[in-house]
Amino acid sequence: MSTLQLSLAIIGGLVLALIVAYNAWTSRRNAPKRAVPQEPERTAEPTLRQEPAFDADAAAPGDGGAFHGLDRGPEPASHTVDAADAMELPVPPMLHERRLGLDPLIDIIATLQPEQSVSGDAALAALPPTRRAGSKPFAIEGLNEVTQQWETPASGQRYQSFQAGVQLANRTGALNEIEFSEFVVKAQAFADAINAAPDFPDMLQEVARARELDQFASDHDAQLSFMLRARQAAWSPGYVQQNAARLGFVPGAMPGRLVLPASTQGLPPVLTLGYDTQAALSEDPDQSAIRDITLSLDVAQVHRSEQPFARLREVAAALCEAMDGVLCDQNGQPLPAMAMDPIAADLELLYDQLDGRELSAGSVLARRLFS
């Protein structure tokens, strides 16, 4: 082989090696970013335990009441609490917000007066099989003889009066004449079963009230959604979950959905993060490429004290920095930071208008109306 042929062979080999290396580098660069494995937390070495014994001499003499280095703690008598001090102890927050019943602000209410008190078991047996009139929630409540409070009929109680209600409007629209008629039929059947006399309001007047409430709700229903797009390399589902978890997100009820819980347990989430469901259900999630995720805020469902929009901006900024993304609108157009300030001002005005209508964001009534 001549020197020229040898040189060409060497050059060809080098070019081939460079092509292979470039392709490998490109593939690695374009591969979805994966979650970084977390090191397990180191736990302290377990303290030697002493098996219980009936021998009073099991403890070493002169140990001052300690068992092999384990403090026995104060004597039970020292745990007594003065009654005055107990009144000053902080009261733990309620896990669930108290449920409010039918409300004339957003419900049509018909009174059902029986000839005599009715047992809770009889009322439960007379309830209709469904709790909707068309697309609107339907409910029946009884006035408890003992507590004098309106409540959902319960076994073992007695009720001196009842009321049936149907919601005036929700996100499917205003209650119409057909739904009102279905409400009357359901309430009348319940009244007949418990031998009660119903008193229904005027249909035309209530339907007009439903339309007015629906118009207000439509004008003040804000559901914000923003997109975070990857600048270069795509993201794997695990990578998205790992970065979102650092900001307090937890898995939602559906694949590809993460939620930021409210400060009070049982309330709707403050924010929702969503991504491609097929990627979340993939057999090999690390190879699933996600180019964008969605951050959403249902304004009427979250109390303003949670400062949801401010938290949305903080979460979006943190995710963009950690994941090399850019904040965009729903159409994928990048949003400058200054574009978020007018939205914040509009939301404050919206909150004030909802408060003025006694439908404060995050309240029970607002969550029912905007659902």
Image (spheres, rainbow, N blue to C red):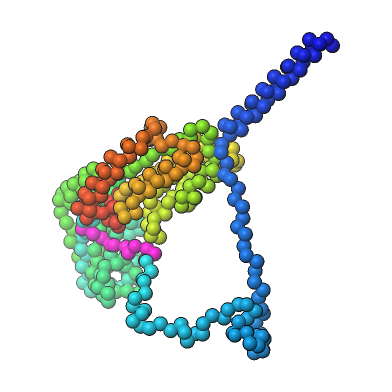
> Residue at (46%, 82%) from the top-left corner?
79
The vertical placement of 156 against 126, above or below, is: below
| x 56%, y 38%: residue | 33
Q: Quadrant of the N terminus?
A: top right
Does residue 96 belong to the magenta stretch?
A: yes
Near-viewer residue (344 or 301): 344
Q: For this view, does 262 lie left or right of residue 117?
A: right
The percent position of residue 170, horizontal first and vertical second, equals 28, 48
Farthest-out residue, bottom: 56
Relative side of 74 to 64, left or right? left
Q: Nearer the viewer, residue 131 or 22?
A: 22
Residue 370 located within the stretch drawn in magenta? no
Tell me which secondary structure the magenta stretch mostly adopts: loop
Q: Position of residue 195 (x, y in %)?
A: 24, 68
Query: Residue 226: where, in percent of width, then height?
Result: 38, 39
Q: Nearer the viewer, residue 177 or 353?
A: 353
Residue 281: where, in percent of width, then height?
54, 43
Region of the chain picked out in magenta, as a range: 94-104
**Farthest-out residue, right:** 1
Is residue 236 depicted above or below 40 in this figure? above
Residue at the image point whose x is 59% and y is 85% from the top: 64
